[in-house]
Image: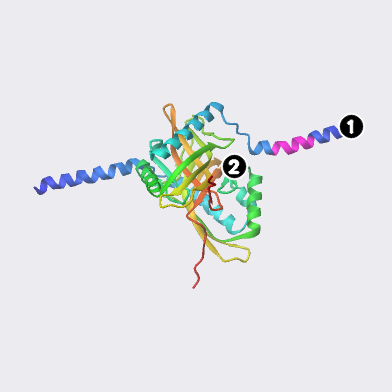
Amino acid sequence: MEKCLLPALVGLAIGFALPTFAQQTNTPDPKLRDELVAFFKAFDDTMLNSDAAAVAALYTEDGCYVDPTAGPIYGKKAIEKSYADMFQKTRFTKHMVKLEQYSPHIIGTAGNEAWMTGEWSLTFQVQNGTPMQWQGHCLDFCVREGDAWKWRVNTWNAIGPPIPVETK
Amino acid sequence: MKRCLLLTLAGLAIGFVLPTLAQQTDTADPQLREQIVALFGKFTEAWNNNDAALYTKDAVFCGGEGSGPHYGREAIEKWFAGGMKQFHFSNHVVTPDQYSPHVIGTAGNEVWVLGEWSMTMQSKNGGSPMQIKGNSLNIFVRDGDSWKARAILTNNAAPPPEPAKTK
């Protein structure tokens, strides 16, 4: 009886596990992942330094940033202006984008285009206002330009509105 | 003198126009755009029917309220079903932005598309209908003669929704 039960349980376990694997089987290339982790770290740094030109430099010439409220902003110059306007009023004291576990996903065979999802979290302060924290998800499509990855398009959403940072 | 002025003006005009063209030169293929417009129409039907068949099996979806990532059709359907239990949705419309779709790579089997969406939602526990809208970034892959969603992230435009006008 025990002999019959064991294979049945193994069968059941495989039966439950296989559909999950079928849904998400992408194992990202570690080197590629490292490159894109570095890309997002560079972005975090530009945000902490309030450096609009450095943010824009992370985009392709025809790159597009989709702001949830303003909509698509096309081109490096317009993206730089959008960030410069924001940095005049807003200062970031924490900014972190973390790639989700299955990203990046390579598109095509050349290995020069990839999309990725991630989680972001940040703390910001508008002028002398209360420090606020906020988090959400992002979807990005990047292309390789020489040795560097650049954004062709990116957007994000938020989990609810920003909330005040808890202070002791 | 006039010739100099004309040339200067022409130079200035080119100077102003060229950077704009450099920023956005992607003209969407009309036939491909029609396919994507039709696909968005199907997404509206699918939304109303809580059907994730338009997603690839390994699709990823991040919802406008910040939920997700939802991996795979089953999880996506579950997320939609949860929303349907709480809210009644109507007037769901998605349109591709003027430059979309953008072909990825050379094979033409993958595209990215920016969409603008809007809809009316009303809590099933009562309350006024709310108009909500936002943007979406969509990565579609060709599936035979049609397209399927590989990844979608939607966001909600601030400020918070206003009550819909009722007669």
How many angstroms separate mark 2 from mark 1 (CA)? 40 Å
- Within-10-Å neighbours for mark 2: few <14, some 14–19, many 20+: many
Nearest the viewer among B141 and A31 is B141
- The three-letter amino acid code for the residue at tag 1 is Lys
The N terminus of chain B lies in quadrant: top right
Q: Residues within 10 Å of mark 1 (few under 14, many from 20)?
A: few
Q: Nearer the viewer, residue B126 or B42?
A: B126
Q: Is residue A146 above or below residue A53?
A: above
Picture coordinates of residue A82 (x, y %)?
64, 50
> What residue is drawn where x is 43% and y is 47%?
A30
State the residue position of label 2.
A63
The numbered mark 1 sits on a residue in which chain? B
- Front residue (pair A53, B24): B24
Residue A7 percent across, percent down from the top left? 16, 44
Image: magenta residue range: B11-19
Quadrant of the rendered structure where residue A49 is? bottom right
Indicate which disc residue B2 carries. 1
